[in-house]
Image: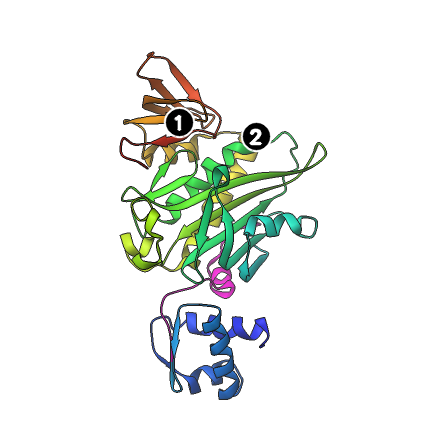
Amino acid sequence: MVPQTLKAHHLDYLNSQTTHSVSIVEVSAACACSEEMTKNVLKEIAEDKMPIHFDDQTVTLLNPILSKVSIVNQLKTERIGHHITLLQSVDSTNDYIKEHLSSLNHGSLVLAHEQTVGKGRLGRQWSSPAGKTLSMSLLLKPSNQKLRYSILTQMAAAALVRSLAANSDAQIKWPNDVLVNKKKISGILTEAEYSGSQLEGIIIGIGVNTNLDKEDIPEPLKEKASSLKIEADTVDPNKIVSRFLEFFETYYESWLSDQDTKPFLDVCRKHSALIGHRYWIEDTVSRRKASIDSLDDDGALVVTYLDTSETTPLISTHYSIRGDDGYI
């Protein structure tokens, strides 16, 4: 087994040459190792099911992948994202942060090429094949113990939509899904970790289907899930990460200062997939049709139920919102 650092070095180099066929000789020279070692490294990378194709002479990385070097070179934040951990494979990036909470600082970012048992809201699974999706978790350690952290999901959604603007016209399906062409390409999961009554950290987990091909989408999900590559074009996940961190830090630092939610909630309103339409509101005990009116200043979805004409904000995120024929 070759060292992870050597694999990362090879992947970083290939990422700088994405979709171009590169000779084994050139790769070994760039990574300062023998051709034989490079072939061994590439074999293990292929065994990790990363998106590469190689033979005895050449190697091609089929799509851009996560790269610490690339993210750091583009990053313009003050604090967020200055400590990055990039893993080949992990059960869940959120769970990784929980396990290492005491040793990670505020603003730490954990990324993974592959997430094997990632989860979304209400315990739903989030699949992420190696090298074709973006799995990341951001750790916040605010000094304010009474921070209303539930609003951070909307803040992250606004930052993510803005980070995708160069690639697609994304929309937000309250509270935590991001859609392109009415299909889910991203989900957000915000979790707070406590020790007794002491807030230890807030974890914002984000999964984005970046470069999945149609055959990578499980058959039961094809009607409601897609990827940026399918709906628009091949994307560089590192640009998305660096942009997201910059937008998020701007919103977060401003909000800590004045508690004004308008800057990011206005983005959520503008890019809402729901406001102005009628959908079914489902929870564990009922299913009711409602018109979706607005998003209030606390991030709650304001709806009017058609059966009673009652207007109310949906505060809990334990609701599901569905169209007549399914997802939306």
- Give the CA distance from mark 1 to mark 2: 25 Å
Q: Left or right: where does residue 129 sit relative to residue 166?
A: right
| Amino acid beneath label 2 | Arg
| Magenta residue check for 128 | no
Q: Left or right: where does residue 188 sit relative to residue 98?
A: left
Q: Where is residue 268 in the image (x, y as percent from the top left)?
A: 38, 35
Q: Which mark is residue 148?
A: 2
Q: Quadrant of residue 60?
A: bottom left
Q: Position of residue 92 (x, y in %)?
A: 55, 52
Q: Where is residue 328 in the image (x, y as percent from the top left)?
A: 30, 36
| Amino acid beneath label 1 | Glu
- The residue depicted at 49 percent of the width and 56 percent of the height is 75
Q: Which mark is residue 282?
A: 1
Q: In this view, does 301 lie above or below 218?
A: above
The residue sitting at the right extreme is: 196
Q: Is mark 1 on a helix, strand or loop?
A: strand
Q: What stretch is highlighted in magenta?
A: 59-79
- The residue depicted at 43 percent of the width and 29 percent of the height is 319
